[in-house]
């Protein structure tokens, strides 16, 4: 489903974020990206939803070439990819319902369908009762649940998450992991960059370690592998 071929990313300032990365990720896989800060994990994630393009090499998702993709095609790609961030990125002046519904409204889904699908998505993450709350009225875990609801509302083939539990306490982090686990069970491919050692060690999923922009380790049922 995802294929990176000889991918290098060098930023304008000369930072070599990724160096000759080759990777294949299958449909329905659950993959943890681990590695030290600055190793290139976020950059790799950004290549997957075409927030960045590689300096060299190819990025393919479902045999679509993201490097050659035209700007006007990018919104269509983004509809098939859900994205979750460490710092939530919810719209502060919109309610929970509006934050999730927004993803459908911008693509012109009919109002009645927006209602039904937004409620269903909030139901799935256990936040139906808070649809009229504003983000600042929610706990961190609840805010991240809203982000998960927003990310999956288009039933994406791929969910990418950059340290989604980074701002959460361990119990709340596990609640979010439960959601991602179940979303993956329903067939969505999940790629998650993380420093959450306990979570990686417990879940026994594929682990790809990035160090200095290179794939340092790739294990089918891996562990976190770093001390801190
Ligand atoms: P993380 O380790 O969680 O990826 P970083 O502090 O490395 O966090 O990066 C935070 C944000 O700043 C990211 O969006 C990243 O792309 C950007 N960033 C990181 N390093 C630089 C840099 N040298 N110049 C500009 N932006 C950067
Ligand atoms: P990680 O997510 O593993 O912390 P990043 O992908 O954020 O790593 O960063 C990899 C390298 O690229 C780091 O040296 C970082 O400073 C640099 N970098 C990341 N984003 C940018 C950016 N927008 N501009 C310049 N350098 C960046």
Image (cartoon, rainbow, N blue to C red):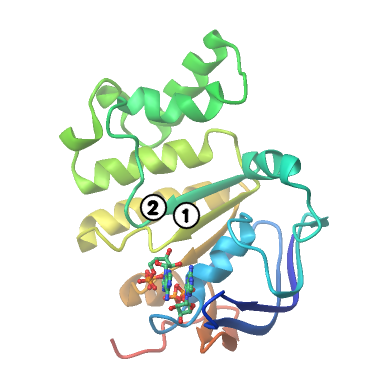
- Write down the residue under mark 2: 178
Q: Position of residue 197 (x, y in %)?
A: 34, 77
Question: Which residue shows up at 60% across the image and 84% down it?
Answer: 218
Residue 108 sits in which quadrant? top right
- From the viewer's perspective, is 103 left or right of 27? left
Q: Look at mark 1 in the image and give the residue it sits on.
A: 181
**In the image, is residue 98 above or below residue 52?**
above
Per the image, label 2 sits on a secondary structure element best described as helix
Spatial separation of the CA atoms under disc 2 and disc 1: 5 Å
Camera-nearest residue between 8 and 209: 8
| Rendered residue at 51%/30% (across/down) | 103
The relative height of residue 14 versus residue 30 in the rendered view (above or below) is: below
Is residue 116 shown to the viewer in this render? yes
The residue furthest top is 112
Q: Quadrant of the N terminus?
A: bottom right
Q: Nearer the viewer, residue 94 or 24?
A: 94
């Amino acid at each position: 489903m995802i294929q990176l071929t000889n991918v290098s990313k060098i930023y304008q300032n000369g930072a070599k974020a990724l160096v000759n990365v080759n990777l294949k990720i299958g449909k329905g896989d659950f993959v943890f990206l681990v590695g030290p800060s600055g190793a290139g994990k976020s950059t790799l994630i950004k290549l997957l939803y075409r927030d960045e393009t590689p300096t060299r090499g190819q990025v393919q998702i479902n045999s679509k070439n993201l490097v050659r993709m035209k700007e006007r095609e990018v919104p269509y790609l983004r509809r098939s990819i859900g994205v979750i961030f460490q710092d939530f990125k919810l719209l502060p002046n919109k309610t929970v319902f509006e934050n999730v519904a927004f993803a459908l409204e911008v693509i012109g889904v009919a109002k009645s369908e927006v209602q039904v699908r937004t409620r269903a998505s909030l139901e799935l993450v256990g936040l139906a009762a808070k649809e009229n709350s504003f983000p600042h009225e929610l706990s961190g875990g609840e805010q991240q649940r809203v982000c998960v609801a927003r990310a999956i509302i288009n039933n994406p083939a791929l969910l990418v998450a950059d340290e989604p539990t980074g701002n959460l306490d361990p119990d709340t982090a596990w609640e979010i992991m439960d959601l991602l686990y179940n979303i993956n069970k329903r067939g969505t491919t999940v790629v998650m960059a993380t420093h959450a050692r306990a979570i990686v060690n417990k879940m026994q999923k594929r682990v790809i370690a990035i160090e200095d922009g290179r794939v340092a380790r790739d294990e089918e049922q891996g562990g976190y592998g770093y001390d801190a």
